[in-house]
Image (cartoon, rainbow, N blue to C red):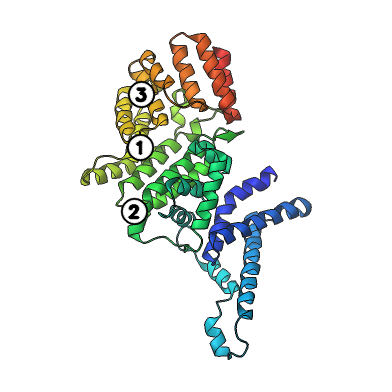
């Protein structure tokens, strides 16, 4: 597959799948037809030239494949009916023509297909890990390898989870669940949306440091989710977190596309509109949390962490003590090694690198490039230069992103 066709595919695959689901296909049928459309594009476009509207071309091809499959299935069913039935009796048992369903689909502009897909893929009958893998595949368009890196899981395990999840969801209707069921699926939906955003914010592989299109799509869905479930603090927390982090995207790369880390960014380039939206969403989250019976949840604390950075007009103005306090709360709610790593980094700035280093070295994050990079930074600040260089070389070996590798190589050259 060429890079150009892959780019179109990433943008259109979710929309195609959703359209076929609404037209009456089950998940397996929809994915098969969409894959058929991709194969057709790979055969026709290089030889015949690109269509004026690639997305429409793919949609037409996918719907034709579905139409063929559905009509074939109906013909097989009709052949089993008794030939002596009169026309009225036959009409009562024959399903609507698939073409009618597809034409109805063209006129349906209600709802958000991506959000529908998310709530279906986050069905409670699926295990939590399966929901995450399937949704990242269907909605974010991530590859199995990208999902494996994002979730610290083996590729074979991810592929198995996706395959089993599809089988379990066969026959599920393509529609938003009732309000009571939406709340039950909200945690999974928020988790997957944030993983989708993070893959765009810091691409796990490839030649680019960020994938802004993926970030903005995740943010669009988070805004839609906050409108759909306005009484849920988590929806506003998720929106706040994404708005505040997305505000930094213009400053995350320089004019040549090279990465710029948070503490080195020109904060004048941060998007002020997104910052205002983020703070407003966080205020709504705080208000809803205060009206409830429990304290802030994980997403709210992550949004508060982003807000601390947003309030610092210069890197040296960062309130590391407040960040450490928030990370203490987050780690109590979400005790995982990545949160512990971020807490240790905050500790190194609030108290000192000597106190943070043993905490970092104790974490089970071998193979995670930013663990090795953080360890290298702490060793460098403690004047243990040879060990710092060795740790940074590990980080370079572990990363699959070319821009990230260049950034770390430049740091290594300066040591």
Residue 321 appears anywhere in the view: yes
Q: Residue at x 48, y 55 (%)?
A: 117
Between 8 and 169, which is closer to the camera in this rendering? 169
Q: Residue at x 37, y 47 (%)?
A: 187
Precedes in sequence: disc 2 or disc 1:
2
Between 121 and 308, which is closer to the camera in this rendering? 121
Query: Label 1, on which residue?
Result: 303
Q: Position of residue 164 (x, y in %)?
A: 52, 52
Q: Which numbered dot is residue 183?
A: 2
Q: Position of residue 320 (x, y in %)?
A: 33, 23
Q: Is residue 298 above or below residue 81?
A: above
Q: Position of residue 315 (x, y in %)?
A: 40, 22
**Label 2 neighbourhood size at 10 Å, few (<14), some (14-19), many (20+)?**
some
Query: Label 3, on which residue?
Result: 318
Q: Which numbered dot is residue 163?
A: none
**Label 3 neighbourhood size at 10 Å, few (<14), some (14-19), many (20+)?**
some
- Which residue is most to the right? 47
Q: Identify the element where label 1 is drawn.
A: helix
**Which quadrant would the C terminus be assigned to in this image?**
top right
Residue 140 appears anywhere in the view: no
Tally of numbered tags: 3
Q: Identify the element where label 2 is drawn.
A: helix
Precedes in sequence: disc 3 or disc 2:
2
Cα separation, mark 2 vs mark 1, equals 20 Å
Q: Quadrant of residue 318?
A: top left
Q: Residue at x 41, y 21 (%)?
A: 362
Precedes in sequence: disc 1 or disc 3:
1
Q: Identify the element where label 3 is drawn.
A: loop
């Amino acid at each position: 597959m060429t890079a150009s066709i892959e780019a179109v595919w990433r943008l259109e695959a979710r929309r195609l799948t959703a359209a076929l689901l609404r037209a009456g296909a089950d998940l397996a049928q929809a994915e098969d037809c969409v894959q058929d459309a991709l194969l057709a594009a790979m055969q026709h476009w290089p030889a015949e030239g690109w269509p004026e509207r690639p997305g429409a071309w793919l949609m037409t091809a996918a719907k034709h494949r579905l139409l063929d499959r559905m009509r074939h299935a109906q013909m097989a069913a009709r052949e089993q009916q008794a030939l002596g039935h009169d026309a009225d009796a036959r009409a009562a048992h024959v399903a609507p023509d698939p073409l009618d369903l597809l034409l109805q689909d063209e006129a349906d502009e209600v709802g958000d297909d991506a959000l529908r897909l998310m709530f279906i893929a986050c069905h409670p009958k699926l295990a939590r890990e399966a929901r995450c893998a399937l949704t990242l595949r269907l909605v974010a368009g991530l590859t199995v390898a990208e999902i494996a890196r994002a979730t610290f899981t083996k590729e074979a395990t991810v592929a198995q989870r996706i395959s089993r999840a599809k089988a379990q969801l066969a026959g599920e209707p393509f529609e938003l669940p009732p309000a009571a069921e939406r709340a039950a699926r909200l945690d999974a939906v928020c988790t997957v949306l944030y993983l989708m955003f993070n893959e765009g914010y810091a691409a796990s592989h490839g030649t680019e440091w960020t994938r802004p299109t993926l970030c903005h799509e995740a943010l669009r869905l988070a805004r839609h989710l906050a409108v759909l479930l306005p009484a849920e603090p988590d929806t506003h927390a998720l929106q706040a977190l994404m708005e505040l982090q997305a505000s930094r995207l213009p400053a995350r790369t320089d004019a040549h596309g090279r990465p710029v880390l948070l503490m080195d960014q020109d904060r004048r380039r941060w998007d002020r509109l997104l910052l205002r939206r983020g703070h407003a969403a966080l205020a709504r989250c705080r208000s809803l949390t205060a009206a409830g019976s429990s304290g802030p949840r994980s997403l709210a604390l992550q949004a508060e962490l982003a807000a601390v950075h947003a309030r610092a007009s210069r890197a040296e103005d960062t309130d590391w003590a407040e960040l450490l306090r928030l990370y203490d709360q987050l780690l109590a709610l979400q005790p995982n090694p990545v949160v512990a790593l971020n807490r240790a980094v905050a500790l190194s700035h609030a108290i000192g690198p000597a106190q943070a280093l043993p905490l970092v070295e104790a974490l089970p994050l071998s193979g995670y490039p930013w663990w090795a990079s953080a360890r290298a930074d702490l060793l460098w600040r403690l004047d243990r230069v040879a060990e710092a260089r060795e740790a940074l070389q590990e980080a370079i070996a572990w990363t699959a992103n070319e821009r990230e590798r260049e950034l770390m190589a430049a740091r290594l050259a300066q040591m």
